[in-house]
Amino acid sequence: MEVETFRQHLESWLDDHAAELAPAFPGAGTLDQQMTQLAKVKRRLFDAGWMQWGWPERAGGTGGSSLLRAVLGEAVTERDLVQPGYFSMTEVLAPTVVDFASPELAAAFLPRILSGDEMWCQGFSEPDTGSDLSSLSCRATPDRDDWIVSGQKLWTSLAQHSRRCVLLTRTGTPESRHRGITAFFVDMDTPGITVRPFSIISGDDEFAEVYFDGVRIPADRMLGTVDGGWNVAMSLLPYERSSCFWHRTAYLRGRLTALIEQVEPDPHTETVVGEAFVALYALRARSHRTQHRLAAGHELGAETSVDKVLVAAAEQRLFDAARELLPAGTIELAADPEALRWRDSFLYSRAATIYGGTAEIQRNIIAKRLLHLGDDV
Ligand SMILES: Cc1cc2nc3c(=O)[nH]c(=O)nc-3n(C[C@H](O)[C@H](O)[C@H](O)COP(=O)(O)OP(=O)(O)OC[C@H]3O[C@@H](n4cnc5c(N)ncnc54)[C@H](O)[C@@H]3O)c2cc1C
């Protein structure tokens, strides 16, 4: 289907189903409310056939351009039907499963995340492994037809709500670094997995520590090849920065519009809002290009670090502007659902220079890999 035709039909369908899709809670709601809302919206979209567009037919999709997925996420975000980061988890993890799982596995599981029946999580970071991902130590050891995994993951978003995990493990020696990593698609209810949620600064239990104690994983759950997990990880990051960022841009645009409606225009306000607008416009222009490169079949790589720097800059500038321009105490005291929403968004924006690769690491990559300044990182 053509992108514009898809957009028009989708918008009209969303208009017709606005009442049933609307959240049943004011403001941003709690994490549990958002999870329930996400599952409801994805289920309705799936039953009506929207979620399957842009995904390959061999894995249960309807086919068509990946731009259709960007348009869908943008539309549901603009209408405040879902929390964009949670909706976009599909965009972070599912392309990698489609690319690296066996065709049978991909076809069995993609429809489950598209339909909202399941949430998945990303088990990459560990207590001593963040930016330097190739130093990870959660170990997988072969045992006849299976693998046995022991170790710990940290900062695993929404692990307690997830049925599966895209997990990176160490299969080579510690010195093998990125050449000794293997990826698996793990059922979170496998014996030996313990999930301990903990709160982010806004108070929601969004993160978890995940412990693996002799967890048995069938070999057919491997993504890619033995010791080929680095390719899996590197293929995932650009996806995290394509459709997801387009959805996030839609969310930021919505908040900028809300801010403009809530503040009195004066020269200072116009300057602060103008700066936030420019940052957002730069992000949108860049992300637009990235969506089209992805849809045209380009392999995305280090250049998506530019998108990551721009999204973090736009998000922080916008919510800094909100904190400065909204009536004093709106964010600090957060006395009603709308103020709570501003507060949570402001606090979450602080993480934008950390998640998915820190701002410093992205600037290193831009300097060294794109501008060829100094050695490779
Ligand atoms: C909201 C959020 C959600 C997340 N969700 C997940 C998830 O679902 N799954 C998952 O696996 N992980 C997740 N993470 C973890 C995230 O990927 C890591 O926080 C990130 O990779 C940074 O790693 P770290 O926290 O260990 O910091 P570190 O790598 O220890 O970095 C600490 C500081 O040192 C700087 N630094 C490190 N190395 C260098 C260098 N070479 N040059 C210059 N500066 C450097 C960093 O920029 C940073 O400022 C999430 C994080 C956040 C904030």
Image (cartoon, rainbow, N blue to C red):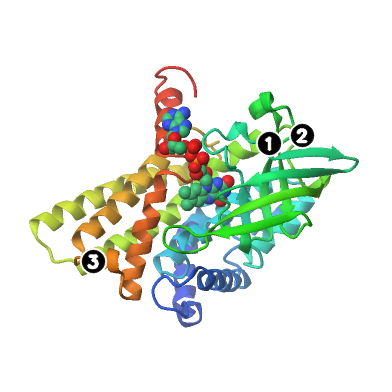
CB atoms at circles 2 and 1 under 8 Å apart? no
Q: In terms of sequence position, does the residue under pointer 1 or pointer 3 come before the other?
A: 1
Q: What element carries label 3?
A: loop
User: Is the residue 148 above or below the residue 165 in the image?
Assistant: above
Q: Residue furthest right?
A: 144
The residue closer to the viewer here, 156 or 79, is: 156
Distance Cα–Cα, label 3 vs label 2: 54 Å
CB atoms at circles 1 and 3 under 8 Å apart? no
* Mark 3 surroundings: few (<14), some (14-19) or many (≥20) residues within 10 A: few
User: Is the residue 326 above or below the residue 358 in the image?
Assistant: below
Q: Which residue lies furthest to the left in this view?
A: 267
Q: Which residue lies furthest to the top in this view?
A: 374
Asked whether, in this view, residue 222 is left or right of residue 355, the answer is right
Q: Where is residue 300 in the image (x, y as percent from the top left)?
A: 52, 37
Distance Cα–Cα, label 1 vs label 3: 47 Å
- Name which residue lies at 49% across and 21% down: 376
Q: In terms of sequence position, does the residue under pointer 3 or pointer 2 come before the other?
A: 2
Q: To which residue does mark 1 refer?
A: 229
Specify the label residue 145 is tagged with: none
- Name which residue lies at 35% across and 74% down: 337
Q: Position of residue 134 (x, y in %)?
A: 61, 32
- Name which residue lies at 54% across and 39% down: 130
Q: To which residue does mark 3 refer?
A: 329
Q: To which residue does mark 2 refer?
A: 226
